[in-house]
Image (tube, helix red, strand yellow):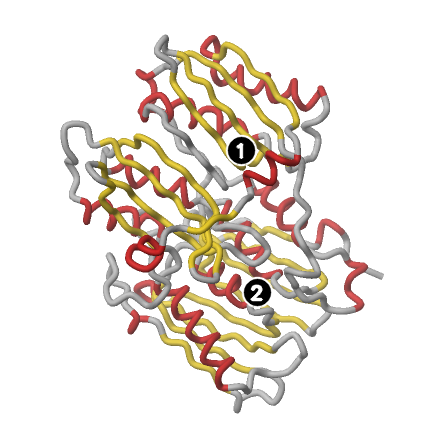
């Protein structure tokens, strides 16, 4: 006996415009499953407005009420959600996440080399698509926006994930894009998959595409792209602090988040009650924190009340199946939850000599996964302010004892920065928090 494959994830679309769709997940349980599902939902641009989670330690039942755009690719979303669920054969016992016991297997990395003509006149009509783990070298902002948007839109459609990219413009008006990508379908080594990629790129770029080549790169390139390094102390302590900030570029302050732990209500679980303001990826931020602490959720409820106020009740236990009774462990977990809800990302606009640099950092899960859509939101916020990007890089860095993805964007000031730095910081923050949608 077992559940049918198609019944692992069921999506019921809303009958009226504006009402949420309902996603039901019914599968074997594992620690961190809620985090993985919330991350996928966030990557597809959906917002969770309500959620219910229950498990007996072997099997779980999760329901999300989500709202999003009419362009949501529901079929692909279901496929990705099913892929994150454990197989039915694993229902004999709950599996706990361990970074040491379950190291991620690095996928094959391919270099996609694309040469095309620059088409500056059409750049403002281009969309910015979803990408992850991005590094960009020096480039012209106008050339980059158009070529980058076109190409990444195709790669996203083809389920190719960008790990690294370098874009440059030659004096004769040609743009050379070097994309380091991985294939979700694991077929990019085949000629058919390569030809399909060529055809999709040419269909979008037309005669602007001069040449395109795809080849697998060696393990040394893969290791280099995933390398983590340290940032200078001045940056980590003064610009991107890990402690609770005294002031934020938003109405959100430390007093707007309440995290209370209770061991009296349940004989077997610790109850965590959270009250806070809603923001993009709120449930993901809670789930990834619990996943990193190897905490299992037995029952949970999440819903948004009036004026973006959220209430979350979670009945949790440790990996050993016991409640959290150690005061130090309680304090550590509640402090981390409070910090991640008050400041899930760090944003700063700083001077680099005569230049102005935007810096954004977000924590990386112990599993090695970063937060989706960050670069997309940064770019969108700068576009709304008519601020051009001169160069950017995105790398994994160690800040204190935690790994972060740090986005460093050098702004093109031209004859002078027309937008005040404080306004840039506020606009980027609000976009990342989902308050400018």
Mark-to-mark CA distance, 1 and 2: 27 Å
Residue at 66% over, 31% down: 218
Vertical arrangement, residue 235 with respect to residue 408, above or below: below
In front: label 1 or label 2: 2
Vertical arrangement, residue 259 with respect to residue 423, above or below: below
What is the secondary structure assignment of the residue under circle 1? helix
Residue at 55% over, 65% down: 292
Residue at 64% over, 23% down: 215
Image location of residue 197, percent across then percent down: 60, 22
Give the left or right position of residue 329, taking residue 344 as reference.
Answer: right
The quarter holding residue 119 reads top left
**Residue tagged 2:** 291
Image location of residue 125, percent across then percent down: 34, 24
Which of marks 2 and 1 precedes in the sequence?
Answer: 1
What crowding class fits label 2: few (fewer than 14 Cα within 10 Å), some (14-19), or many (20 or more)? many
Q: Look at the numbered discs 1 and 2 and tell me whether their residues touch, using CB distance below 8 Å.
A: no
What crowding class fits label 1: few (fewer than 14 Cα within 10 Å), some (14-19), or many (20 or more)? some
Q: How many marks?
A: 2
Vertical arrangement, residue 172 with respect to residue 38, above or below: above
**Residue tagged 1:** 156
Quadrant where the N terminus is found in the figure: bottom right
């Amino acid at each position: 006996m077992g559940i049918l494959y198609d019944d692992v994830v069921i999506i019921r679309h809303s009958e009226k415009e504006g009402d949420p769709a309902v996603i039901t997940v019914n599968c074997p349980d594992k620690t961190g499953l809620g985090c993985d599902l919330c991350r996928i939902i966030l990557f597809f641009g959906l917002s969770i407005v309500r959620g219910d989670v229950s498990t007996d330690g072997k099997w779980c039942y999760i329901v999300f009420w989500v709202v999003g755009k009419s362009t949501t690719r529901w079929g692909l979303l279901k496929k990705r959600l099913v892929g994150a669920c454990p197989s039915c054969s694993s229902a004999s016992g709950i599996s706990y996440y361990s970074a040491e016991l379950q190291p991620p297997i690095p996928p094959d990395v391919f270099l996609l080399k694309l040469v095309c003509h620059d088409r500056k006149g059409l750049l403002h009509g281009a969309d910015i698509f979803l990408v992850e783990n991005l590094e960009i070298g020096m480039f012209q902002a106008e050339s980059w926006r158009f070529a980058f948007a076109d190409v990444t839109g195709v790669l996203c459609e083809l389920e190719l994930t960008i790990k690294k990219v370098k874009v440059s413009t030659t004096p004769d008006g040609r743009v050379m894009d070097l994309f380091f990508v991985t294939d979700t379908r694991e077929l990019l080594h085949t000629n058919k998959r390569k030809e399909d990629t060529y055809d999709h790129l040419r269909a979008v770029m037309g005669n602007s595409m001069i040449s395109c080549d795809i080849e697998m790169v060696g393990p040394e390139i893969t290791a280099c792209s995933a390398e983590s390094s340290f940032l200078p102390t001045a940056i980590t302590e003064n610009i991107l602090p890990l402690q609770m900030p005294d002031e934020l570029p938003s109405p959100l302050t430390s007093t707007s988040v309440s995290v209370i732990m209770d061991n009296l209500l349940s004989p077997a679980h610790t109850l965590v009650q959270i009250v806070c303001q809603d923001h993009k990826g709120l449930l993901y931020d809670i789930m990834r924190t619990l996943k990193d602490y190897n905490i299992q959720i037995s029952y949970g409820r999440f819903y948004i009340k009036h004026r973006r106020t959220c209430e979350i009740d979670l009945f949790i236990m440790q990996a050993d199946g016991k409640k959290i009774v150690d005061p130090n462990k309680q304090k550590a977990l509640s402090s981390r939850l409070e910090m991640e809800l008050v400041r899930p990302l760090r944003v700063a606009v700083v001077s680099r000599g005569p230049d102005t640099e935007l810096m954004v950092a977000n924590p990386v899960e112990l599993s090695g996964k970063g937060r989706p859509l960050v670069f997309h939101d940064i770019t969108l916020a700068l576009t709304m302010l008519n601020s051009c990007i001169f160069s950017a890089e995105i790398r994994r860095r160690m800040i204190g004892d935690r790994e972060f993805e740090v986005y460093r964007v050098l702004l093109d000031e031209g004859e002078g920065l027309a937008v005040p730095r404080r306004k840039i910081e506020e606009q980027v923050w609000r976009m990342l928090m989902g308050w400018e949608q």
